[in-house]
Image: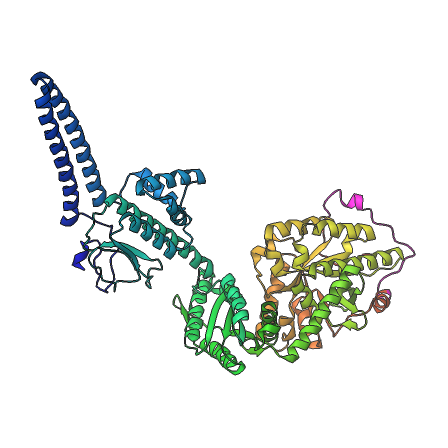
Amino acid sequence: MDSMNGSARRSGNGNFFPLPFETTGPKNVSVISRRLLRRVAIVTTGTSVLVAALWTQTSPSVTVALMGLLLVVVLVAFGSSLDRTRRLLNATRDPIARDRSTRVGLAESVGLRGDADKQGLLSERMRRSLRLRDDESAVLELIAADTDTPVVLRAITQLLANQFPGAQFRVASGVTTETTEADCSWLISPPSQNDRGWTLEAAVGEATVEFDPEVISLGSDLARLALDKARSRRSLRYLADHDALTGLLSRRAVLQALDAAMHSAQKIGLLYVDIDHFKSINDRFGHQAGDDLLVEISERLREDAAESTFDVRIGRLGGDEYLAVVTRADRREMDTFAERLAFAMRAPFNIGGVTISTSLSIGSSFTDTPELTSAEELLREADVALYQVKRHGRNAYRRFDEELRSWSREQQELEDDLAVSISKRSGIHAQFQPQFDHEQTLIGFEALGRWYRQGVGLVPPDQFLGVAAERGLMADFDHELFSHVANVLGQLRRDGRSFGLVSVNVSAERLERDDFVDSTLDLMRGSSIDPHSLILEITESSLLRDLAERGARLEKLRSWGVRIAVDDFGTGYSSLSYLRRLPVDIVKLDKEFVGDIDTSDQSRAIVRAILDLASALELTVVAEGVEREAQFEILRDLGCDIFQGYLLGKPLTLDDAKDVAERTFEVEDTQPTVDWDSLGSMAVELSTDLKPPK
């Protein structure tokens, strides 16, 4: 477009390069030159007329003096005009590179910086500089507010049109608009694939009026600043709406998409997606490999969504969870799409030269009557369906249906009843499974948490323990269980009965509470039980979440005589380093190794290694899950210390456990109350000899 004086040039793809607005071509220089010559001619003509008049009316000496004075005035006026011309030419050559104060003022005028007082002063300056009429104040305020970029550009166009009534100013939507005589346009290129912002250029065609370069440059600067601010806002909006790692919609954006769909679509489906065993992948290959895997999985999800014949908005909820909002699809189409997503994960991923295989668990919900449901309910239904998939082995797809609705209702009632039982301190009690030494002599019991549900009866542990953990009730449940056990042991001691050593499980949720140590000691002190008779069982993983802090808490209890056992040893993060640093007295072999020790050489070798390790560290080893005589004999021959399982004894009620204890332990008329003050005065030396106290 040669007629545009070089202010914008076409690139190879037909777009305009964003160049500074220029008016240094011959036409514009001639305009400024004509202004200077016209002013010089006016001054010269006026001076000549005045000199002729004075020559005829005054004496020669006075005339010469007046002529000298007039010459000085002419030179000053000429110098002023020349200086103004020089400034105009400099402004046209580089209008963007103005002095700093002017650029700061322009930035303030579009709301980029400055306070209200400064902006008010700037507005007044612009009114004078642009010679604005009073009725144009609203246009200036619109520019300063900068709430809508197209509106701002039209406002700037209006300002320029007011300054040059004979010219045509308009906002061009692209490069197809041809400039004509007396035509000036703002050329705006829409966002490209690599640049999400808009590009503005000022182009001037053949003009029949004289343009003030300073005014046009000021308007150009304003327009550029407005677009820069819009580009920044658009970039921030993109970051807020998209996940930084995968580029998919962010949690906020995908939930907003769901809300929008609930008000506009007739058929809405949700797919709640979870990557199977992602934590294990992170632990095995590292977090960087995990992040790279998330990126690759997200790309496959994005490709499948793009190939769909219906609308799909996929976002990452966080971690390894995704949510897909499906609209304009029926149930069958949504099911097919979910199966296609799962199938896309069948091919392994190459992450940093390592082959990683994974799968998806997907739960879904669907409605064709969005006016009768809510986004929260639809999301909850998809979550319930996903939960069922994960409960039954993962790597599957399940849609929420009436069967799940009934199960969900029952689960909600169970959660509510469990919360009530804990808050009212009713129904939480223990059954006691006996533990024996290698001669099958009773050593003590493990207290197993049980819940008697009002109106239902005894609830199996596998039906409520998971619910307690998910609902955040596990710490309170453990506290009530320990309170119950402490009361039982205190009463038995006051009755002169011995119960041997008693183990009680402590969840990670209770261990991480700040009042764990104090509340445990308070319950023991209040029941007056002997701390030497108590063993607290902690899972391996819960100990290692905050090794230093949790180790210090357990060490404080250990100083009172309480023993610490690591439950399910061998399945988590077992190492010599951890066992050396943690305050541990006992390790409990996991059932996984005990279950096939009589049939698997590998399990037998692992148990032998654990027993050798425990012996070197002077730790007691308990084998749980002993159900066959062959298992007991192998474990006894390998040197295991204590045995627990259905072969030797099932969990017993309190009364039955008392009967078993009476047949083993001596019964005294009374037993002295524990002196807690003396126990707390010094650390208690612990022994690995687990003979029950008398």
Picture quadrant of residue 654:
bottom right
Residue at the location (41% across, 55% down)? 148
**Residue 432 percent across, percent down from the top left:** 78, 66
Looking at the picture, does residue 128 appear above or below residue 504? above
Q: Between residue 475 and residue 371, name the one nearer to us.
A: 371
Residue 311: percent from left, percent from top:
46, 74
Main secondary structure along the magenta-highlighted residues: loop
Whether residue 499 is visible = yes
Q: Position of residue 555 (x, y in %)?
A: 67, 50
From this view, report whether residue 143 is shown above or below residue 43.
below
Question: Relative to 63, does residue 8 appear above or below in the rendering?
Answer: below
Residue 418: say if magenta.
no
Q: Quadrant of the N terminus?
A: bottom left
Quadrant position of residue 295? bottom left
User: Which quadrant of the figure contains the C terminus?
Assistant: bottom right
Q: Is residue 81 left or right of residue 152?
A: left
Colour theme: rainbow
Relative to the observer, which residue lies in front, 673 or 268? Answer: 268
Query: Above or below — where is 79 with respect to 96?
Result: above
Give how far across and how far down residue 99 sits, in percent: 29, 38
Q: Residue at x 86, y 59 (%)?
A: 492
From this viewpoint, which residue is outermost toward the bottom? 332
Q: Which residues are magenta?
A: 662-684
Q: Is residue 506 left or right of residue 276?
A: right
Verify whether residue 674 appears in magenta: yes
Q: Nearer the viewer, residue 546 or 436?
A: 546
